[in-house]
Amino acid sequence: MAEPEAKKEDADSRRIQTFPIVRFCDMPEEMKVETMELCVTACEKFSANNETAAKMIKETMDKRFGASWHVVVGEGFGFEVTHEMKNILYMYFGGNMAVCVWKCT
């Protein structure tokens, strides 16, 4: 009986972590929500290819909010960037996937 219970707990913990968790953001609320939705969509669509997910996010952000956006998608990375005020989002998705999106000139 203990085994099915452990499997249920594992499934529950994975389900809980499927929503985005914002680590840092100084974007206006509307831009933040739109960017988060874009990041989740890209990470789900290209779950096997972080480079393609980052490319989709960057190209979409450039079109919606003007150039020059930069994107990092992956696991286990650190960063320090200079960015325009009100133009950075750092979030986690799916437990161990992180996305950092920022704009600089």
Image (cartoon, helix red, strand yellow):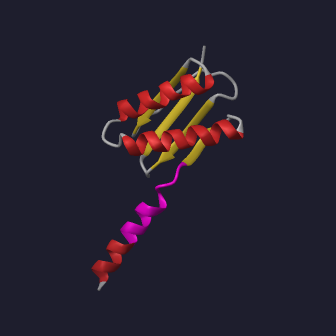
Q: How many marks?
A: 0
On screen, 61 above or below 94?
Answer: above
Residue 25 shows up from this direction: no
User: Which quadrant holds residue 65?
Assistant: top right
- Work out which residue is located at the far bottom of the displayed protein and give it: 1
Residue range (magenta): 9-20
Dominant SS in magenta? helix
Quadrant of the frame with the C terminus:
top right
Using the image as rendered, state which of residue 75 and residue 58 is in the foreground. 58
Using the image as rendered, state which of residue 80 and residue 73 is in the foreground. 73
Quadrant of the frame with the N terminus:
bottom left
Is residue 12 inside the magenta stretch?
Answer: yes
Q: Residue at x 44, y 30 (%)?
A: 56
Is residue 25 inside the magenta stretch?
Answer: no
Position in image of residue 57 (x %, y %):
48, 31
Position in image of residue 61 (x %, y %):
55, 27
Using the image as rendered, state which of residue 5 and residue 15 is in the foreground. 15
